[in-house]
Amino acid sequence: MRSRILTPAFVLCALPAVAQETGLTLAIQLEPPHLDPTSAAAGAIDSVLYANVFEGLTRFASDGSIEPALAESWEVSEDGTTYTFALREGVTFHDGSAFDAEDVKFTLDRARGEDSTNAQKVLFEGIEEVAVVDPQTVEITLAEPDGALPFNLAWGDAVIVAPESAEDIKSAPVGTGPFVFDEWVQGDRIELARYGDYWGEAPALETATFRFISDPTAAFAAMMAGDIDVFSNFPAPENLPQFENDPRFQVIMGSSEGETILAMNNAEPPLDDVLVRQAIAHAIDREAIIDGAMYGIGTPIGTHFAPHHPDYVDLLGLSAHDQERARTLLAEAGLSEGLRLSLKLPPPPYARRGGEIVAAQLREIGIETEIVNLEWAQWLEEVFRGQDFDLTIVSHTEPMDIGIYARPDYYFQYASPAFQQIMATLKATTDPEERSELLAEAQTTIAEDYVNGYLFQLAWPTVAAAGIEGLWANQPTQANPLADVRWTE
Amino acid sequence: MIRRLVPGAVLSALFVLAALVSYVWTPGDVTGVDIASKLQPPSPEHWLGTDHLGRDLLAMLMVGARTSIAVALVAVGIGMAAGVPLGLAAAAMRGTLLDEVIMRGNDLVFAFPSLVIAILITAIAGPGAVNAIVAIGIFNIPVFARLTRGAALALWERDFIMAARVAGKGAPRISAEHILPNVTNLLIVQGTIQFSLGILAEAALSYVGLGAQPPVPSWGRMLAEAQTLTAIAPHVALMPGLAIVLMVLGLNLLGDGLRDVLDPRLRDLRT
């Protein structure tokens, strides 16, 4: 310190190196709408805050397994309905207040309460009561046994918030994580700083800046210019080989929970007819879509399930690329000619480019599509909420989200009592083997009903400056935990 | 004069011809996708190479020319159809309230940057070729209204107009029979310039995703989609870029050349 003050020349050359070792600028595609992970579905909120500012009782590891976080350990009662969580000691919120069982009770009651705005209320549905045993112990009673509780509590929607700070959480998030929220310059960046009193190992980074760049060209330029150190989910797969061949960069190819699907409006004719949906499924050539839209990155899927999950069932054969079969099916449905469908596409390249390819493939079997390119806000309004569409392409990035098929009001409007029954049974089943069987049955049911066109599992390419380590490769949930990230050079 | 007119006319004619030919023949399918042959450099099979979805770039450019020309042509048509009568009326009623209302209304439209208006219109009405036409057409109106009024005002002072008035013709008839034929040359020249601006505006709107929607090819969107490919396959960006440059250059040369030929004052200077 002293030498710096005494010799300005040294300061000048030393500062950039020092800054590089403890600061990190990370770019993601979308800016969060606000900063409360417990009241919005936007993945961008978790991308910035999950495991950085906020923590839950449990958390996802990069490989998707569940590890303890604010709960040190937990025990399940014999009948599977009572979970007793032992909380970690010495944990404080960023405003200095202590973390204890009351905060857990507050958080979970807030999330499952009637006026809750939690985007994943279904995670907490089974909870009957949250009881404070002592400041370090919480007991959660379930209506029925549910082996998925530790998994459910690892979601960004279940992070622990304090009653003192919950009110202003959307603009001033206060959590227990290794980083403190510092500043949000809307439209530009969010800055985090190391939390000195963090309960765990202190992170190597002193500051972290999140920036938001969705334009592929701008992303490429910013990365090449060194304005950003890490780009999580780089938006232009065609540029990845350039980074791979450049010693200044590393490309980390991970998997995501993003099932990319050609969603169909199951409630409206003609797509309420399973024959038409099946025809479309057979018209699709997944390899061409992965090659053309994603430059080869992505794994084909035959159902709405992540292929890296142990319970994944390969059902690609049910909807193999077969134009002859597709035409026959269309004829059976009495629609061999003149079928016109809207295809509404959100901005990501997988949708825009994939959409043009799907349109060309559908034209081959005689279906004309009218492509409408939409911005995200319009897409959410028209397609997701308004359900005004025939076809759309979107990636569902939530983990284990096959449950959305049990919601008849969900935007693709699949109403199958049989499927809903499977999910209900699954919920009440704790035996791992039985659960696997039920999950297989669920996957097969939606594949055989051709609810949607299942295209591919979105890969998650991260481009980083060489010399950064500790980044998450995979995205079991949308997140960029920075606690273990460090510069090695 | 020939120096500009001929290359301008040839270049413009080339694109119009390409657009017309595309109705009966293109070197490839512009809506079919052939991923296996994506991003190919120019070759005997694909003269200008292929784009990121394996479509023939020459075919895309030809059909894209159709989109550009159609949008610009109709937009200029809208501008003329509304702007010229407004200008004629303002000149005939010069100094009256009507003149003021028309011209200040025009100023109002003119005050907004044209592309911003276009983006506004397409943002409200939704993207698409038709809305792009309307958007570009609207900001063409004041251009023609002003031009027509300015030229007509000078004509109203001329003796032959006085003669027509003495003969008992009313203002509408004089405007139609005597003023309009005498401003036609100016309108043709300005029309050519506006046409080239229309091509640019269409490309700009498509570039930001507000023009013709896929799979209809459009030069601006081709350019936008090729942006991330400049390092891998530069020809994919270069071809639509060149098309826009050459077409606009051609139209501007043609406009200048036409002005040299048609403008009576310039003609007088030379003789």
Image (cartoon, coloured by chain):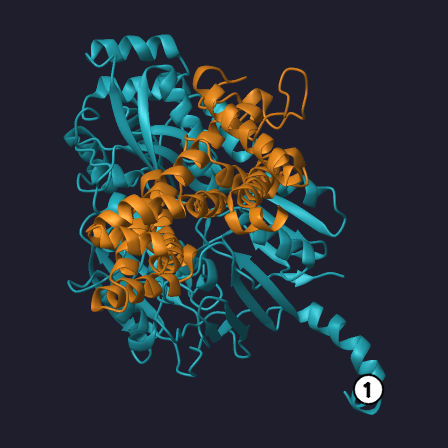
Chain colours: A cyan, B orange
Q: Is residue A356 above or below residue A146?
A: above
| Quadrant (top left/top right/bottom left/bottom right) for the C terminus of chain A | bottom right
Element at badge 1? helix
| Residue A342 x, y percent position in the rendering | 28, 32
Residue at 37 percent across and 56 percent down: it is B155
Residue at 34 percent across and 73 percent down: it is A169
| Residue B65 x, y percent position in the rendering | 49, 31
Task: Between residue A436 and residue A352, name the one nearer to us.
Answer: A352
Count every numbered label the image shows and give the total: 1
Rendered image quadrant of residue A230: bottom right
Q: Is residue A425 above or below residue A134?
A: above
In the rendered image, is residue B70 in sight? yes
| Residue A287 x, y percent position in the rendering | 50, 23
| Residue B178 x, y percent position in the rendering | 32, 47
**Which chain's residue wears label 1?**
A
Q: Residues within 10 Å of mark 1 (few under 14, many from 20)?
A: few
Residue at 43 percent across and 30 percent down: it is A356
Task: Between residue A51 and residue A426, name the one nearer to us.
Answer: A51
Left or right: where B150 falls relative to A445: right
Q: Which residue is mark 1?
A: A8
Q: Amino acid at mark 1?
A: Pro
Q: Is residue A353 above or below residue A31?
A: above
Q: Is residue A95 above or below residue A72?
A: below
In the rendered image, is residue A471 in sight? no
| Quadrant (top left/top right/bottom left/bottom right) for the N terminus of chain A | bottom right
